Amino acid sequence: MLSENKESFEHFRKVHDKYGLNQDLNQKEYNLEGKKIMAIIKDYEARLCSRSEGNGYASFTGKLAEKFWEEVRHEFNLIDYIGIISKKEPDFVLRKIKLN
């Protein structure tokens, strides 16, 4: 997975490391790049698990998927933070009007 998508994962590594330094400032960029990487990771997870289910090892598929995600988290420890939406300020604020 990493070798076949080397450029994508190298770019994500830079964004991942930058996000680790300052999560508040880099959340939007991390979500954007993370969405692309998650699609790749989930594709490989589906390939891996569907093969084991098709070969009669369906009872082991859950553990296999867990092990796969452990390896992903070992490589990218902040992978679970993809998709977090943080709001510091509300989108809409109704302000009082001062009448004299």
Image (cartoon, rainbow, N blue to C red):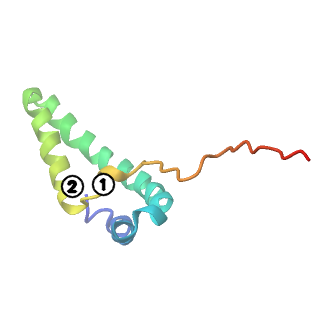
Q: CA distance from mark 1 to mark 2?
A: 6 Å
Depth check, front residue: 98 or 91: 98
Q: Hey, what amino acid is under mark 2?
A: Arg
Q: Badge 1: how crowded within 10 Å, few (<14), some, or many (20+)?
A: some
Above or below 49: residue 2: below
Task: Determine contact: label 1, label 2, CB under 8 Å.
Answer: yes
Residue 30 locus on image (x, y percent): 43, 60
Above or below 99: residue 37: below
Q: Which mark is residue 73?
A: 2
Residue 82 locus on image (x, y percent): 38, 51
Residue corresponding to mark 1 = 79
Q: Quadrant of residue 49?
A: top left
Q: Residue furthest front?
A: 100
| Residue visible at 77% across and 43% down in the picture | 96
Q: Which mark is residue 21?
A: none
Above or below 70: residue 25: below
| Residue visible at 52% across and 50% down in the picture | 87
| Residue visible at 89% across and 44% down in the picture | 99
Position of 61 compared to 32: left or right?
left
Q: Determine whether the residue tagged by mark 1 lies in a helix, strand or loop.
A: helix
Residue 52 locus on image (x, y percent): 13, 35
Residue 10 visible somewhere in the drawing: no
Position of 84 compared to 4: left or right?
right
Position of 71 compared to 13: left or right?
left
Q: Hey, what amino acid is under mark 1?
A: Ile
> Mark 1 or mark 2, which has the lower sequence index?
2
| Residue visible at 21% across and 62% down in the picture | 75
Q: Determine whether the residue tagged by mark 2 lies in a helix, strand or loop.
A: helix
Quadrant containing the N terminus in the rendered view? bottom left
Residue 20 locus on image (x, y percent): 33, 67
Depth check, front residue: 88 or 54: 88
